[in-house]
Amino acid sequence: MDDEVAANRVVWERASEKHVREYGVLLAEAARREALLPQELELLGPVLERRPVVVHLQSGHGVDDVSLLAAGASLVVGVDYSVTAATAAQQRARELGVGAQYVVGEVPVVPIRDRAADLVYTGKGALIWMRDLDAWAVEVARLLKLGGQLFVYEGHPAVPLWSWDEDEPRIRADRSYFAESHVNDSFPADGAREWQWTLGQIVTAVVRAGLAIEVLAEYAEPFWRHGGVQAAAWQGRLPNSFALLATKRQRDPVEDVVL
């Protein structure tokens, strides 16, 4: 773990303490089993009906995992590099009696065997922590069974550009869509370095790893809003989130021919 990743981990551990302070609130939220957004359920419904084993990379507080199980997943294994977050999520899963298990690991290299997952689920503030997107995509492909699927629901790569002005959407003068990274200046990652990936870079990494894109959708609605803010950038004119569904290609029959 290099110095920048280690510094980010310290920030994330500090932010994850909120999961402990607000344990009861998150427990009640998880118990409602309503954490998946309508856009997610629309795309994931047919996948979850098949009772998949799910690996949730960068699982955070784990509230989404309870909803994944309620929607049909047979097992969810969450991976997060915060000991605080993983411990609190495991305790909530036990209290709710659901089939979610948590391991501490630094994505992209995680302590889970090859082809363990029917579905890899990730997003809602995950990719910004990935310094090497190609390595992340390769790890996703390693975890998936043949025919397995990756689902990402994430903040749109253009979001770092939007100001929170309430009168008119504006582009921040200190941000660039093509910048390598920026320092976050809001909770929960205040002070952490976030890596920026364009939509083209994300799609290209997934395809290079051997996954076929099935759906790429963009949405005006953000998945998270800072409390008390009514930013004009969130009022339907700009992209604020996206979803990606991709499938690990079946083995090409030519590969099995012995010459």
Image (cartoon, grey):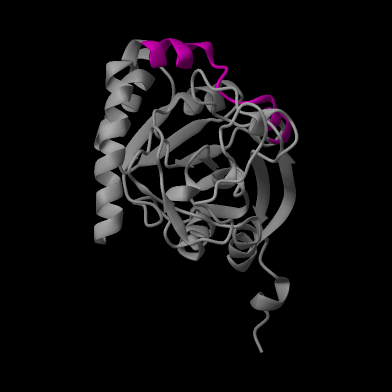
Quarter-of-image position of residue 28: top left
Residue drawn at (38%, 33%) of the image:
188
Residue drawn at (47%, 40%) of the image:
56
> Up-down: is 74 above or below 54?
above
Using the rendered image of the protein, determine whether residue 82 is visible from the camera's viewpoint.
no
Residue drawn at (24%, 59%) of the image:
3
Question: Residue 152: x percent and y percent?
Answer: 59, 44
State the quadrant of the C terminus: bottom right
Quarter-of-image position of residue 205: bottom right
Question: Residue 198: x percent and y percent?
Answer: 60, 57
Magenta residue span: 25-43
Question: With 253 as the anchor, is 122 left or right in this view?
Answer: left
Question: With 174 as the anchor, is 23 left or right in this view?
Answer: left
Based on the picture, tell me whether residue 257 belongs to the magenta stretch. Answer: no
| Residue at the limit of the structure toward the bottom, as seen here | 259
Question: Residue 162: x percent and y percent?
Answer: 59, 41
> Up-down: is 28 above or below 60?
above
Using the rendered image of the protein, determine whether residue 186 is visible from the camera's viewpoint.
yes
Q: Is the magenta stretch mostly helix, strand or loop?
A: helix
State the quadrant of the N terminus: bottom left
From the viewer's side, name the closer residue of 112 and 123: 123
Quarter-of-image position of residue 121: top right
From the viewer's side, name the closer residue of 150 and 50: 150
From the viewer's side, name the closer residue of 109 and 50: 109
Question: Residue 125: x percent and y percent?
Answer: 49, 40
> Up-down: is 201 above or below 214?
below
Count of picture labels? 0
> Up-down: is 85 above or below 115?
above
Question: With 130 as the anchor, is 15 left or right in this view?
Answer: left
